[in-house]
């Protein structure tokens, strides 16, 4: 009995020992597994951290490299990618009176002599002003934008105080061409006047400045417009000129010129004097160019239905004021004849029957009561007659007097006249296909079709004959208005304008040419009116820009005016 109990106890002890050992082994295995798992997680976190830091460093390095390579200001191009404004490395001339540390004079030579030597390198430099700055010992710029060859000549002077720090400069490869569109960049790095000011934030944005910003301008058209305006100014000794080429379906400005121009590469006193933009900022009474607008409003309202109807063409007497024509064309005229001969009396009588409310509403629909719609910051406010137009004011506005607007207002209005009746705002941004604004309807499509006929007749048989470029189906209207002065209108100072569109069988572009105070010269047959000075500018310009814009001369096509031609005396080919 005793022996059996002892044996059982020994067996039980062995079982407990085995169980204990198994538990210990299992626990040890779990500990090893947990330690391995922890080490694996730590290693995985470390690898991910290393990978992240490497990737982040690469992104930072790439971003820093891109920022270093990008110019400080983005490039501007025309609609075809031609560079108009770009940044490039340049030198500046800086006077550092502390360049010599010995405490003596900062200059080896006399300040006046150094100024004279600098004047020989930079002829436009103010020698006396530079000499005073050098003598005063005041640090500062002596000149911005120094060419490499000029920098070499400055170093040859041998003055350590004349330093040539590297800077980034704004350069306009086309020079003064398109200056009023582009503007310029001031010494503080911000744009001024033109699209440089409008696009300033975008052009300085690191995320944007790597991509060129295209404008709607076509520099081939811009160059031709400026060239013909400049020629017209010289031939007539005009004090200024303005012009615009506008896409009638999109409102894109293909060219915009105001003369005299300034050079954005070199802003001086003359440049500041010529920065005023005559196209968008100066308002004029544009005279008879308003007559087609009045006739279109009358056609829309049903006042003009029968184009064979004769209207009284004798002087109109309103109180003490008399409205007359420049020449005697007889006692009566129909509407086509009135436009061809530019009759004030017939236009005034049509406006009188139309009424001031309807004519005023048309002008408002054309934006004539507001600043012109375009991105440029300089936009002139029209001289608007107000809310209530008396009978006389309504008549004078009908032929372009008593209301003053910019040439851009007129361009947008003529686009609506010929494109089917839709007014759209002008823009200097290049638009993608289908991005043109919907605009607003001002005239019926049928009225626009009739106006294309009438404008074509003016160019064929009337005051616009000098603009009738063969094969281009030009239509348009002249306007000659006396400029107002301190004591009424000045008989000797005219604003001459020709507003045109082409080709009239399918209008694509409006062209405005304006001369400020042209004189009667041999080139203009001693005449000062638009028929002799502004119209010829358009007549020379359209054959130059037509092929560039995809409009080639075609003598076999024209707008159909067969129903109106018999109404006009002498209306034969």
Image (tube, helix red, strand yellow):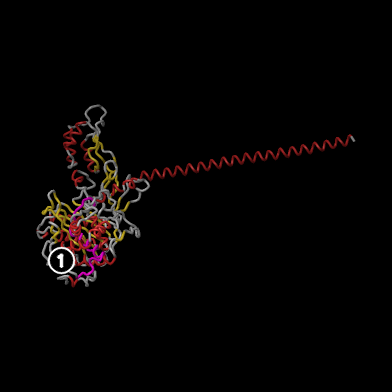
| Helix, strand or loop for disc 1 | strand
Residue 281 magenta-drawn?
A: yes
Looking at this view, is 97 or 475 the one in front? 475
Instruction: Give the residue number, with chain letter if any, for mark 1.
Output: 312
Can the viewer see residue 245 in this picture?
no
Residue 447 magenta-drawn?
A: no
| Quadrant placement of the C terminus | bottom left
Image label count: 1
Can the viewer see residue 266 in this picture?
yes
Looking at this view, is 73 or 308 the one in front? 308
- Horizontal placement of 38 versus 243: left or right? right
In the image, the segment drawn in magenta is 280-308
Q: Residue furthest top?
A: 103
Q: Position of residue 344 (x, y in %)?
A: 16, 61
Give the residue at x 14% y 57%: 319
Q: Position of residue 227 (x, y in %)?
A: 19, 56
Q: Position of residue 445 (x, y in %)?
A: 29, 65
Q: Residue furthest front?
A: 319
| Quadrant placement of the N terminus | top right
- Horizontal placement of 201 versus 114: left or right? right
Q: Quadrant of residue 538?
A: bottom left
Q: Position of residue 536 (x, y in %)?
A: 16, 61
Give the residue at x 12% y 61%: 326
Q: Quadrant of residue 33?
A: top right
Give the residue at x 84% y 37%: 8
């Amino acid at each position: 009995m005793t022996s059996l109990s002892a044996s059982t106890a020994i067996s039980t002890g062995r079982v407990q020992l085995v169980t204990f050992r198994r538990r210990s082994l299992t626990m040890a295995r779990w500990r090893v597994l947990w330690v391995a798992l922890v080490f694996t997680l730590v290693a995985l976190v470390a690898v991910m951290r290393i990978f992240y830091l490497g990737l982040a460093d690469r992104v930072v390095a790439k971003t820093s490299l891109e920022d270093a390579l990008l110019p400080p200001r983005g490039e501007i191009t025309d609609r075809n990618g031609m560079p108009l404004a770009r940044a490039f490395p340049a030198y500046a001339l800086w006077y550092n009176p502390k360049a010599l540390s010995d405490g003596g004079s900062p200059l080896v030579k006399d300040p006046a002599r150094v100024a004279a030597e600098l004047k020989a390198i930079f002829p436009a430099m103010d020698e006396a002003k530079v000499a005073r700055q050098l003598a005063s010992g005041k640090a500062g710029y002596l000149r911005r934008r120094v060419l490499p060859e000029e920098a070499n000549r400055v170093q040859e002077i041998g003055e350590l105080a004349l330093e040539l720090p590297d800077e980034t400069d704004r350069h306009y490869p086309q020079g003064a061409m398109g200056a009023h569109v582009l503007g310029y960049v001031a010494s503080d790095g911000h744009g001024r006047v033109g699209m440089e000011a409008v696009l300033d934030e975008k052009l300085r944005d690191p995320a944007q400045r790597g991509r060129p910003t295209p404008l709607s301008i076509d520099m081939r058209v811009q160059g031709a417009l400026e060239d013909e305006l400049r020629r017209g100014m010289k031939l007539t000794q005009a004090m200024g000129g303005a012009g615009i080429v506008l896409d009638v379906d999109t409102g894109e400005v293909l060219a915009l010129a105001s003369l005299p121009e300034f050079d954005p590469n070199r802003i001086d006193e003359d440049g500041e004097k010529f920065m005023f933009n005559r196209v968008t900022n100066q308002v004029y009474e544009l005279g008879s160019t308003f007559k087609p607008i009045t006739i279109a409003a009358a056609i829309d309202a049903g006042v003009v239905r029968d184009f064979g109807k004769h209207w009284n063409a004798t002087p109109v007497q309103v109180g003490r004021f008399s409205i007359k024509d420049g020449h005697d064309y007889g006692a009566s005229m129909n509407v086509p004849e009135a436009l061809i001969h530019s009759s004030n009396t017939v236009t005034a009588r049509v406006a009188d029957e139309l009424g001031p409310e309807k004519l005023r509403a048309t002008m408002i629909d054309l934006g004539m009561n507001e600043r012109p719609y375009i991105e440029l910051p300089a936009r002139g406010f029209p001289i608007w007659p107000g809310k209530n137009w008396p009978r006389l004011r309504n008549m004078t506005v009908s032929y372009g007097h008593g209301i003053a607007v910019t040439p851009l207002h007129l361009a947008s209005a003529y686009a609506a006249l010929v494109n089917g009746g839709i007014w759209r705002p002008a823009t200097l941004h290049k638009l993608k296909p289908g991005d043109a604004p919907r605009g607003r309807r001002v005239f019926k499509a049928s009225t626009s079709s009739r106006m294309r006929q009438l404008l074509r007749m003016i160019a064929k048989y009337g005051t616009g004959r000098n603009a009738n470029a063969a094969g281009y189906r030009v239509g348009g209207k002249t306007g000659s208005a006396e400029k107002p002065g301190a004591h009424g209108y000045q008989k000797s100072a005219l604003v001459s304008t020709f507003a045109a569109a082409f080709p009239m069988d399918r209008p694509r572009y409006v062209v405005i040419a304006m001369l400020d105070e042209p004189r009667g010269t041999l080139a203009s047959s001693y005449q000062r009116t638009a028929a002799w000075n502004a119209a010829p500018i358009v007549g020379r310009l359209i054959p130059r820009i037509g092929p560039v814009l995809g409009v080639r001369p075609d003598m076999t096509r024209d707008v159909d005016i067969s129903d109106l031609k018999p109404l006009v005396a002498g209306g034969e080919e």
